[in-house]
Image (cartoon, rainbow, N blue to C red):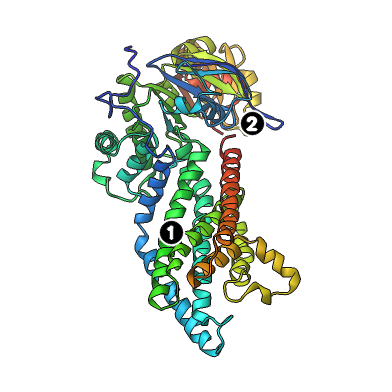
């Protein structure tokens, strides 16, 4: 028998693989973007309507009852950056819970990816880059709506978009590591109910954390959302100083790097056995 | 192509693969035959470089599976036991995104997708979402997808398990074509007919060990007789009847529902059974198969 070692099917030329410019992980991001293309319309509407309803309902409606605003700032202007950061975080969490578990268990596309030259790190990085794109788009839309409603007094506020998006991805990276350890979706419901929800309510999104009982304040300070909210708010109000924003950003980057590293480790332990 | 020596895979206390030696040559169709739990899939995962060996050496395409996994995987095609297609995407999108994992350009991936869908007889379904497709179509798509990088070796783990007979035959036909074209095939199966049809050479695995090795024909010659007489009696237990046919054949195996008499000449054996005054419900003379080889080597049937 002829010892021909390549499949003639689809191989009539010698063209072979080359490493993509950005790295092997970019093919994973590409896969998620193709998936997303099938459902973007639904998320586009909700990512536009959600900020509009939040800002109109809570900012303008509830805000009308608060004559003094918060710290001399109209309530809608106070919560706009908070909601921006919270929406980014919620989107990040939403993209790294069921989709991570699903890709391991229900429709095991990760197994397909790992049968190729890709390793667990590529799978994680590619997925998180997609999440970053998603979160960034959501943040831009939110910001545009908030600005249109007059809730962004300072031009510096534009920088709140990348800061809020960073907060979303940083939390998503850790959320990914957690989701990848689970064997059932019960744990995903828990994280949404007992981590994401409380964090959105008590991290300075709707009211300053100084309103919390003293012993709870350090908890709020530890959350990534509080840092994203504080930095975003300082930027939209135009009162940001470089060291303060840099401090918050550095803390968020720490979450991102630790989460990314842990995710790769967890996925390797789970899938490469 | 593939060389394993003393290959071991353990999970905690459990030993899935217990020191096997295997060599796969270029261009051949090589099979791992054995019942569920024999260690076939664990072996395949090690060869696919997604499961590090616990001990022993494993060399694939001249590279070390432990340290050069990514380079090896770049030249393998993998058809896993359970489909890993993206069910939300269309048939052609599945090939496109998969080809990109190998670093192939968008243009090349699209060209190959067209050829591969033709090969898999799925051209008409190119734009269909995968989820509602039949099991046979998904399997064919998985095989087409596995060929996108023009692999040197195609690994197939239980390629036809769960398919209806017609879909199996379509799939075998496609695999035959690949084999004829010189693609090295490595497959696991617990169907002896599949092993006989597709494999040039195979190893019989049981409880993590290789219990026999050779071509389907040589295995049958070595471990079984030319013919088998199957006798079914109207009794609850066939064991007592087995004593009555003692000496009729070289060897007698007792199954819950029938007796297997191993002999070079089934007709004569049947005549002898009749002469002894036994009256079976049914008597069938057939050639030996790999199923008989397995039964002889392990005392158990392949599919239970």
Residue B272 seen in this snapshot:
no
Quadrant including the N terminus of chain A = top left
Q: Is residue A144 above or below residue B68?
A: below
Residue under the image location 48 percent in, 49 percent down: A128
Q: CA distance from mark 2 to mark 1?
A: 72 Å
Mark 1 belongs to which subunit? Answer: A
Which of A88/B224 is in front?
Answer: A88
Mark 2 belongs to which subunit? Answer: B
Which of B219/A145 is in front?
Answer: A145
Q: Secondary structure at mark 1?
A: helix
Q: Is residue A79 above or below residue B14?
A: below
Label 2 vs label 1, nearer the camera: 1
Q: Is residue A131 above or below residue A219?
A: above
- In the picture, the disc for residue A136 is 1
- Local crowd size for mark 2, using a 10 Å CA cut-off: few (<14), some (14–19), many (≥20): some
Which of B120/B269 is in front?
Answer: B120
Horizontal and vertical percent for residue B227?
Answer: 47, 15
| Residue corresponding to mark 2 | B237
Horizontal and vertical percent for residue B261?
Answer: 54, 18
Q: Secondary structure at mark 2?
A: loop
Horizontal and vertical percent for residue B197?
Answer: 39, 23
Residue under the image location 34 percent in, 64 percent down: A41
């Amino acid at each position: 028998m002829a010892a021909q070692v390549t499949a003639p099917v689809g191989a009539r030329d010698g063209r072979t693989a080359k490493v993509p410019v950005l790295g092997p992980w970019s093919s994973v991001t590409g896969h998620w973007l193709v998936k997303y293309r099938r459902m973007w319309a639904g998320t586009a509407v909700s990512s536009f309507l959600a900020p509009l309803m939040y800002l109109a309902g809570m900012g303008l409606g509830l805000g009308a009852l608060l004559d003094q605003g918060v710290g001399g700032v109209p309530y809608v202007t106070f919560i706009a950056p908070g909601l921006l950061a919270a929406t980014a975080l919620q989107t990040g969490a939403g993209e790294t819970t069921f989709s991570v578990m699903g890709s391991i268990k229900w429709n095991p596309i990760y197994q397909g990816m790992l049968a190729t030259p890709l390793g667990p790190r590529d799978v994680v990085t590619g997925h998180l880059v997609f999440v970053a794109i998603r979160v960034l788009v959501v943040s831009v839309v939110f910001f545009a709506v908030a600005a249109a409603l007059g809730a962004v007094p300072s031009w510096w506020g534009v920088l709140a978009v990348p800061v809020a998006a960073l907060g979303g991805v940083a939390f998503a990276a850790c959320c990914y590591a957690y989701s990848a350890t689970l064997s059932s979706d019960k744990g995903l419901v828990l994280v949404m109910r007992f981590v994401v929800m409380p964090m959105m309510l008590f991290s300075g999104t709707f009211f300053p954390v100084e309103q919390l009982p003293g012993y709870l304040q350090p908890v709020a300070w530890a959350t990534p959302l509080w840092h994203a909210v504080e930095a975003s708010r300082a930027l939209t109000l135009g009162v940001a100083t470089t060291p303060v924003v840099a401090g918050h950003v550095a803390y968020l980057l720490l979450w991102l790097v630790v989460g990314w590293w842990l995710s790769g480790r967890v996925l390797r332990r789970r899938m490469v056995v | 192509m593939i060389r394993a020596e003393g290959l071991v895979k353990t999970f905690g206390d459990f030993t899935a693969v217990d020191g096997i030696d295997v060599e796969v040559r270029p261009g051949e169709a090589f099979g791992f035959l054995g019942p569920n739990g024999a260690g076939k899939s664990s072996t395949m995962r090690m060869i696919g470089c997604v499961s590090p060996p616990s001990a022993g050496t494993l060399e694939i395409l001249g590279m070390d599976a432990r340290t050069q996994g990514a380079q090896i995987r770049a030249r393998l095609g993998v058809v896993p036991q359970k489909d890993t297609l993206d069910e939300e995407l269309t048939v052609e999108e599945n090939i496109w995104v998969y080809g990109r994992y190998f670093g192939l350009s968008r243009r090349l991936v699209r060209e190959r997708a067209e050829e591969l869908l033709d090969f898999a007889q799925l051209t008409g379904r190119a734009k269909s979402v995968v989820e509602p497709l039949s099991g046979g179509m998904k399997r064919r798509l998985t095989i087409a997808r596995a060929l996108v990088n023009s692999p040197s070796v195609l690994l197939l783990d239980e390629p036809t398990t769960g398919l209806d007979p017609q879909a199996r035959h379509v799939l075998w036909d496609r695999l035959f074509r690949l084999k004829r074209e010189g693609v090295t095939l490595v497959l696991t199966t617990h169907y002896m007919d599949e092993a006989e049809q597709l494999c040039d050479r195979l190893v019989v695995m049981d409880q993590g060990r290789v219990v026999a090795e050779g071509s389907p024909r040589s295995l049958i010659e070595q471990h079984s007789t030319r013919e088998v007489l199957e006798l079914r009696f109207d009794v609850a237990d066939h064991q007592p009847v087995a004593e009555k046919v003692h000496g009729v054949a070289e060897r007698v195996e007792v199954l819950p529902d029938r007796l297997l008499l191993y002999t070079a000449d089934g007709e004569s054996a049947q005549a002898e059974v009749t002469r002894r005054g036994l009256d079976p419900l049914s008597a069938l003379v057939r050639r030996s198969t790999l199923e008989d080889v397995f039964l002889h080597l392990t005392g158990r049937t392949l599919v239970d």
